[in-house]
Image (cartoon, grey):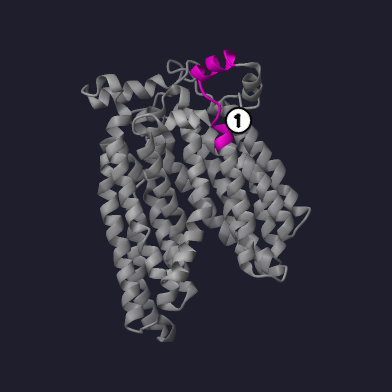
């Protein structure tokens, strides 16, 4: 773990890591916290589900626009979103508290009154989603500047591992807090984390952009030179048209977004298939958390292992190391980001159909643990690819396109798996097993786009 010790010793690295942790923890917990809080206030899971859908829709639809604003104005613009985001969530908490305190649960009201009382919740949730600050996208763009070329992969690996760990810890902490106190407290407790993360990134950005020897130089020029210096000679950043924006400007980004939609399909289906299989086996649906937890845990381990591979400086140190250390270094992933992305996509396509051979909770648990290993490698490779495929001035917007694509896939996968599981719980496994093959086929067919042409030829 020497790479991570060296990484966290860099100026601004701990602040960016803490902001990543707070952001991942909050965003991975919002859905459960909203369901628990709104259901406790309304007595209706339908209202709770509609509130989560409104939050997700507002977040996904406007994510690229928020990313473009932060690209143009810098990380300090995160406060522009964090403040109204927190205000909208506080408004939703106040509405739920009023319903609980006044004893006016929507469950006992007439249908028309229920719909009328539901609209303020949906509006607040949609506003909260629409103003969610792009913390993770901003942090991802800062990691290469903080880490430097030799530790950039370790920075991306730490970011991916924090996200996977939050998928396990976030819902668990939210559920525990809701059980020990009240669901509204669990939702309100997530708000300060997002605001604190935005402030940390705004403060860490100048330190990440400026090298220690020239802190007083122009921030914009330093940030540009630092970002350009991270691109290895064999990876030239694609020139983006001044007129085309977003997906139209970069064919590689289009490939990654469509792959993220396909990956989101099976991830969303997994979240429904696991509890459905647990209930079909005669146990509590909560047992379905086991495959999800093992998947995230395996992904954390794979992300950290993948990030141990350093850059040119670490290869020189490896060659000068004793034989035992050199043998350990050979077990690390030596390949470049496009190759690792394609290999991990292919591994997912081969692993996940195995759940159809043993259509039970136990079979899905084993399959999910194996798939988590490939998913961790894929995430780190994806973060590295963005450094090489997207111009630094549009890095945050590019990542938000990916989150929008995966969010759309998650929604479709969860909805489709829910319909398939109505007749037979094992039917939901089809949406777990098949979409990864589509993602791998697309990535392999368009693999040339993942290796950008030199700028002169683009």
Q: Is residue 158 above or below residue 44?
A: above
**Is residue 311 highlighted in magenta?**
yes
Residue nearer the viewer, 234 or 420? 234
**Is residue 141 highlighted in magenta?**
no
Identify the residue at image location x=44%, y=21%. 231
**Range of the magenta residues?**
304-321
Quarter of the rendering containing residue 200: top left
Q: Position of residue 156 (x, y in %)?
A: 48, 34
Q: Position of residue 198 (x, y in %)?
A: 31, 46
Residue nearer the viewer, 177 or 457? 177
Q: Which residue is denoted by mark 1 in the rendering?
A: 340
Secondary structure under badge 1? Answer: helix
Q: Position of residue 96 (x, y in %)?
A: 35, 73
Quarter of the rendering containing residue 17: top left
Q: Is residue 364 above or below residue 208?
A: below
Prevailing secondary structure class for the magenta stretch in the rendered image: helix
Q: Is residue 273 left or right of residue 257?
A: right
Mark 1 nearby-residue class (10 Å; few <14, some 14–19, many ≥20) = many
Identify the residue at image location x=69%, y=47%. 352
Residue 244 visible here:
no
Q: Position of residue 102 (x, y in %)?
A: 32, 83
Identify the residue at image location x=38%, y=47%. 63
Residue nearer the viewer, 442 or 296? 296
């Amino acid at each position: 773990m020497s790479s991570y010790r060296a990484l966290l010793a860099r100026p601004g690295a701990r602040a960016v890591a803490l902001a990543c942790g707070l952001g991942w923890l909050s965003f991975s917990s919002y859905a459960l916290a909203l369901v628990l809080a709104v259901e406790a206030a309304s007595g209706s899971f339908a209202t709770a589900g509609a509130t989560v859908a409104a939050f997700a829709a507002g977040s996904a639809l406007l994510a690229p626009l928020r990313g473009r604003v932060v690209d143009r104005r810098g990380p300090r613009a995160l406060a522009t979103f964090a403040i109204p985001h927190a205000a909208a969530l506080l408004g939703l908490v106040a509405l739920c508290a009023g319903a609980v305190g006044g004893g006016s649960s929507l469950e006992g009201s007439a249908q028309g009154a229920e719909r009328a009382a539901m609209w303020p919740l949906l509006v607040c949730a949609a506003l909260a989603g629409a103003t969610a600050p792009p913390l993770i996208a901003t942090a991802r763009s800062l990691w290469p500047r903080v880490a430097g070329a030799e530790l950039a992969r370790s920075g991306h690996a730490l970011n991916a591992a924090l996200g996977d760990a939050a998928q396990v810890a976030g819902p668990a902490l939210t559920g525990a807090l809701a059980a020990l106190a009240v669901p509204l407290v669990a939702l309100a407790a997530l708000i300060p984390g997002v605001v604190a993360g935005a402030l940390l990134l705004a403060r860490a950005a100048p330190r990440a952009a400026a090298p220690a020897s020239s802190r007083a130089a122009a921030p914009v020029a330093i940030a540009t030179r630092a970002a350009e210096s991270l691109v290895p000679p064999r990876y030239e950043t694609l020139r983006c048209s001044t007129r085309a924006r977003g997906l139209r400007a970069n064919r590689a980004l289009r490939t990654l977004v469509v792959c993220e939609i396909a990956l989101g399909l099976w991830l969303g289906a997994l979240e429904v298939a696991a509890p459905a299989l647990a209930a079909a086996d005669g146990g509590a649906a909560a047992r379905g958390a086991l495959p999800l937890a093992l998947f995230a845990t395996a992904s954390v381990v794979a992300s950290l292992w993948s990030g141990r591979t350093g850059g040119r400086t670490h290869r020189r140190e490896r060659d000068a190391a004793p034989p035992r250390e050199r043998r350990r270094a050979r077990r690390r992933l030596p390949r470049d980001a496009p190759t690792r992305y394609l290999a991990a996509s292919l591994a997912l396509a081969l692993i996940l159909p195995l759940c159809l051979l043993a259509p039970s909770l136990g079979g899905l648990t084993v399959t999910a643990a194996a798939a988590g290993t490939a998913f961790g490698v894929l995430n780190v490779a994806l973060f590295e690819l963005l450094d090489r495929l997207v111009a630094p001035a549009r890095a945050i917007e590019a990542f938000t396109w990916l989150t929008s694509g995966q969010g759309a896939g998650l929604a479709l996968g969860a909805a489709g798996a829910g319909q398939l599981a109505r007749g037979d719980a094992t039917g939901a496994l089809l949406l777990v097993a098949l979409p990864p093959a589509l993602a791998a086929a697309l990535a392999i067919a368009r693999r040339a786009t993942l290796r950008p042409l030199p700028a002169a030829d683009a």
